Image (tube, helix red, strand yellow):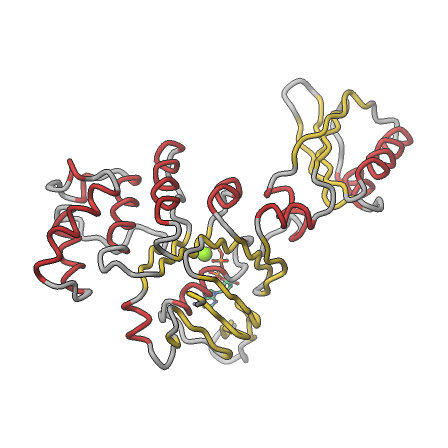
Amino acid sequence: MLAIETSDLRRTFNRSRGLFRGGEELVAVDDVDLAVPEGMIYGLLGHNGAGKTTTIKMLSTLLIPTAGSARVAGFDVVADERSVRRNLGVVLGGDRGLYNKLTARDNLVYFGHLYGVPRGAVGPRVDALLDLVDLGDRAADRVEGFSRGMKQRLHLAKALVHDPPVLFLDEPTIGLDPAAAVRVREIIAGLAREKTVLLTTHYLHEADALCDRIAIIDHGRIIVEDTPAGIKSQVGGDRRHLISVRGNLNGWTRELLGNLPGIASVDLEPTDDGLTTITLVANESAASVDAALRALHQEDVEVDAVRTADLTLEDAFLALTGERSE
Ligand SMILES: Nc1ncnc2c1ncn2[C@@H]1O[C@H](COP(=O)(O)OP(=O)(O)OP(=O)(O)O)[C@@H](O)[C@H]1O
Ligand SMILES: [Mg+2]
């Protein structure tokens, strides 16, 4: 069975410009079709404003779709909103959603009751979840004294308190230090197969490591849907090419390289030692790198070194979506 299924899911907002002028319609989610099998960790990636949170809000019954349909755990998000909520745990970004004056344990107990967990089951469930998210020894402390990483782990535990089969995590590691993010990722990875997880993140190495499949959304539309490896190979070459050159390169050079056939993306980064590293993602590896080197030579740019490296999901993402956001 599919845990999450959408068909032509659409949401528009009225971007009104002052009181008396007519509003302009903004299409935030544009006919999105998703089919997420049970037990998967599924990534929804896209630039700022691409439509990820709007999609998650529609799937979690917080926003009504403008058109199309969506089912979560087999239930329609509009017609069967209560069943959807019962089968769903959601972690939306931000600090809200926990009671600061309550202890970690009391927060979870409160939400357990709210979600209708049977009385006798709440205590043991809460203790198990506190252990799962490494807060067992802080269970009796008030949340107001928690670090961001601890709060984020408690958010995860809260989303799991009614043992839902489906979990939506909107940027679950945002603002966490590397160690805290690693721990949250381990917890998410541990949920695989038991739960279906829909995850958004701007950390593409995180998506690469965690997700079984990924959909990339751009201006409200799904432009690619595949495994992380599949997405990398769709960009063509499975390598990226790093060319170090002397001096600073301008936007014009970038455009020149970007317009060469077979070059999927160009990124310029100055390095401390006065060089510029040009990262090329090339479709037809050898030929397009040669063309780039010839072009640089014609521009009298001195090439210092050429290396190849494995293509990252980030390279593929930028090549597929372009580098601008919104
Ligand atoms: N309540 C709203 N009213 C008007 N426009 C909105 C509203 N919510 C979202 N939008 C617009 O819809 C588009 C998609 O926003 P959304 O929050 O879904 O993006 P996102 O992919 O989650 O981005 P981010 O990575 O920044 O979180 C944006 O253009 C945004 O400005
Ligand atoms: Mg968002």
Q: Quadrant of the C terminus?
A: bottom right
Q: Residue at x 88, y 27 (%)?
A: 300
164 left or right of 125 in image: right
270 left or right of 256 in image: left
Q: Is residue 40 above or below residue 308?
A: below
Percent of width and height locating residue 142: 14, 43
Please tell me which residue lies in front, 292 or 194.
194
Q: Residue at x 40, y 55 (%)?
A: 197
Q: Residue furthest top?
A: 273
Please tell me which residue lies in front, 145 or 70.
70
Q: Is residue 134 above or below residue 120?
A: above
The answer to which quarter of the image holds residue 56 is: bottom left
Q: Answer yes or no: is residue 16 visible.
A: no
Q: How many marks?
A: 0
Percent of width and height locating residue 67: 50, 79
Q: Residue furthest left?
A: 120
Percent of width and height locating residue 323: 64, 48
Q: Answer yes or no: is residue 4 visible.
A: yes
The answer to which quarter of the image holds residue 159 is: bottom left
Percent of width and height locating residue 256: 83, 42
Q: Residue at x 67, y 52 (%)?
A: 320
Q: Residue at x 42, y 61 (%)?
A: 38
Q: Quadrant of the N terminus?
A: bottom left
The answer to which quarter of the image holds residue 301 is: top right
